Image (cartoon, grey):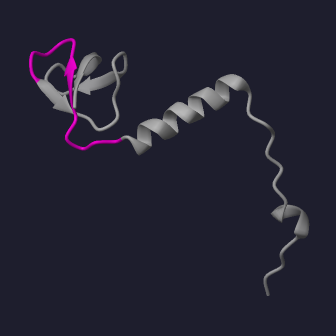
Amino acid sequence: MVRIVNDSLTPRHRDLAADERRRAERRLSRRQAANPLRRVLLACETTSVRDPVAVVGDHLWCEQHADFARVVDVVE
């Protein structure tokens, strides 16, 4: 027997603060704009790496140097 309590079905989410809302909107827009063929240039490499959602200023893992590197350019 499954018992469902009505109180558990009512949403109790609080309103998002302005900075939380901005982060959520950015995260959603980046997921929707994902392009699997996008290439990004890392600060430590001369070649580009594929990443569907990275933007300039993000840090990605560099396999060649085994460390994180900053994204300096995006090529669509």
Q: Is residue 46 left or right of residue 43?
A: left
- Identify the residue at the far bottom of this view: 1
What percent of the width, then of the height, locates residue 43? 21, 12
For image coordinates 89% across by 69% down, the residue present is: 6
In front of the other: 26 or 7: 26
In front of the other: 9 or 39: 39
Total marks in image? 0
For image coordinates 66% across by 28% down, the residue present is: 20
* Looking at the image, residue 25 lies above or below residue 56: below
Q: Is residue 23 left or right of residue 69?
A: right
In the image, residue 27 lies in the stretch drawn in magenta: no
Q: Quadrant of residue 67?
A: top left
For image coordinates 13% across by 16% down, the residue present is: 45
- Identify the residue at the far left of this view: 47
**Viewport quadrant of the N terminus:** bottom right
In the image, residue 46 lies in the stretch drawn in magenta: yes
What percent of the width, then of the height, locates residue 48? 14, 25
* Looking at the image, residue 72 lies above or below residue 63: above
What percent of the width, then of the height, locates residue 69? 27, 17
What range is drawn magenta here? 34-47
What percent of the width, then of the height, locates residue 4? 83, 75
Principal SS element in the magenta part? loop
* Looking at the image, residue 33 lies above or below residue 62: below
Q: Is residue 51 left or right of residue 13?
A: left
**Viewport quadrant of the C terminus:** top left
For image coordinates 88% across by 70% down, the residue present is: 5
* Looking at the image, residue 2 lies above or below residue 22: below
